[in-house]
Amino acid sequence: MSGFFKSSIGRKVAMALSAFFLMFFLIIHLAVNITSLFSEDVFNELSHFMGTNPLVQFGLQPVLIFGVVFHFLMGFVLEIRNKKANGVAYAKNNGAANSTWMSRNMIYSGLVILAFIVLHFIDFWFPEINTKYIQGDMSGMHDGGFRYFHELVEKFHNPLRVGAYVVAFILLGLHLAHGFTSAFQSMGLTAGRKKNMQTFGKLYSIIIPLGFIIIALVHHFNH
């Protein structure tokens, strides 16, 4: 296994697999959050189920955290190794002629997204862990009703925080636009299917971030 991760192909495959996992998680996360635009009760019920189900909490959640950390660490490793491999020849090449701006700056968009994830954890995950496992309150209740919807809309009251979310999701979209196709290429995508995957990747990289942006803006202006 260690030999697999030492090879360039092995690292790229591992990076692609972690990307697929995180992209699937984004779909689930958006599906749950978007219910907050239509039904407070449905959002509260789904949030309570996800927040108290043992399989989600002690099975899927640790895997998700590992996937996020692994994806970013592997991305940094690949970026450093690519630059070392290219060396002086890299400086002589006109990168803009052979690649997109985003493909050359994935590391920077990744750092911004990582900073956003830290903010997201501070906003939602840390308080949730504190309430459930430190204070010992697994009821999900506050003032006679579920607290999840109220906590969500309160986080989108501050325009600076909403602005940070919007910028982060725009960068996430750009990151996905390149990363989606790259992940499939690492897994052996054939040239004949590349165009279809690029089209699907563009749609995914627009719809998913736009959905999160709409949620933030709607709750902000309806506050």
Image (cartoon, rainbow, N blue to C red):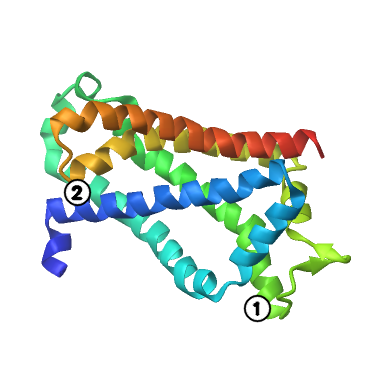
- Provide the residue designation for mark 2: 81
Give x and y (percent) for residue 217. Answer: 69, 34
Q: Is residue 64 above or below residue 91?
A: below
Q: Earlier along the polypeptide chain: callout 2 or callout 1?
A: 2
Q: Which mark is residue 73?
A: none
Q: Nearer the viewer, residue 60 or 130?
A: 60
- The residue lying at 15 percent from left, 43 percent from top is 188
Name the side, left or right, on which 164 lies relative to 112.
right
Kindly indicate whether the residue at mark 1 contacts the one at mark 2 (C-beta within 8 angstroms).
no
Q: Nearer the viewer, residue 162 or 199?
A: 199
- The residue lying at 34 percent from left, 34 percent from top is 105
Give x and y (percent) for residue 199. Answer: 33, 27
| Mark 1 closeness class: few <14, some 14–19, many ≥20 residues within 10 Å | few
**Alpha carbon separation for disc pair 2 and 1:** 41 Å
| Mark 2 closeness class: few <14, some 14–19, many ≥20 residues within 10 Å | few
Q: Residue furthest right?
A: 143
Q: Is residue 188 above or below residue 194?
A: below
Q: Is residue 24 above or below residue 125?
A: above
Q: Residue furthest top?
A: 97
Badge 1 amino acid: Tyr
Give x and y (percent) for residue 196. Answer: 27, 28
Name the side, left or right, on which 169 lies relative to 105.
right
Q: Nearer the viewer, residue 180 or 144?
A: 144
Determine whether the residue tagged by mark 2 lies in a helix, strand or loop: helix
- The residue lying at 48 percent from left, 43 percent from top is 112
Give x and y (percent) for residue 191. Answer: 14, 30
- Provide the residue designation for mark 1: 133
Badge 2 amino acid: Arg
Quarter of image, res 143: bottom right
